[in-house]
Image (cartoon, helix red, strand yellow):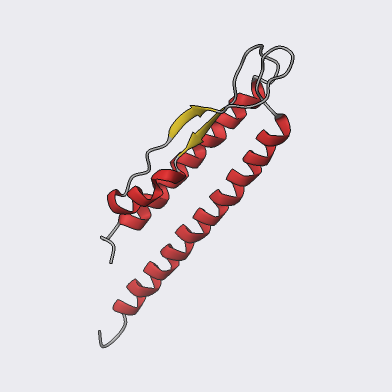
Amino acid sequence: MSAPGLIPGVLASALQGLSMREQVIAQNIANIGTPDYQAQDVQFAATLQQAMQSGNVDAQVVTEPGAMNQNGNGVDLEQQIGLMNQVALIQQGVMDQVDADERVAKTILNDLGGAGV
């Protein structure tokens, strides 16, 4: 059984990591024409197991190796748009879980406030 508040903390940290990843992807897209710019990404999925124990996701920005175009730029626009869409889907899933948890908590509180309890 997890400690109270652990799951909401992990979900909040996951949303922070996803938001950071979204910002880095936008930065990559903004620099698509910058010579020698290397695409970056935010990785935190590998630390998700630790997050379940500590309640914290350690997101890190890393440079992504990849093919370079003529000016040494390593941003693949199609890939970045795909990543942005992936982030949006994951964010929606996390928010759906947060909403479900909130509904359960409200139901429990309402039940506890009923007659005979």
Q: Which residue is depicted at the point 66% across and 25% down?
A: 75
Q: Which residue is depicted at the point 28% across and 62% down?
A: 2
Q: Quadrant of the N terminus?
A: bottom left
Location of residue 106 with respect to 90 vertically, above or below = below
Estimate the x, y position of residue 69 in percent, counting from the top left.
72, 18
Q: How many marks?
A: 0
Image quarter of residue 85: top right
Front-most of 96 and 10?
10
Left-right relation of 109 to 45 = left
Image quarter of residue 87: top right
Location of residue 88 with respect to 34 vertically, above or below = below
Front-most of 68 and 88?
68
Image quarter of residue 52: bottom left
Location of residue 37 with respect to 98 vertically, above or below = above
- Inspect this view and state whether residue 20 appears: no
Left-right relation of 103 to 28 = left
- Inspect this view and state whether residue 88 appears: yes
Estimate the x, y position of residue 10 in percent, counting from the top left.
37, 51
Q: Which residue is depicted at the point 42% across and 64% down?
A: 101
Estimate the x, y position of residue 11 in percent, counting from the top left.
42, 51
Front-most of 31 and 109?
31
Residue sitting at the far bottom? 116
Q: Quadrant of the C terminus?
A: bottom left
Estimate the x, y position of residue 108 in percent, counting from the top left.
35, 74
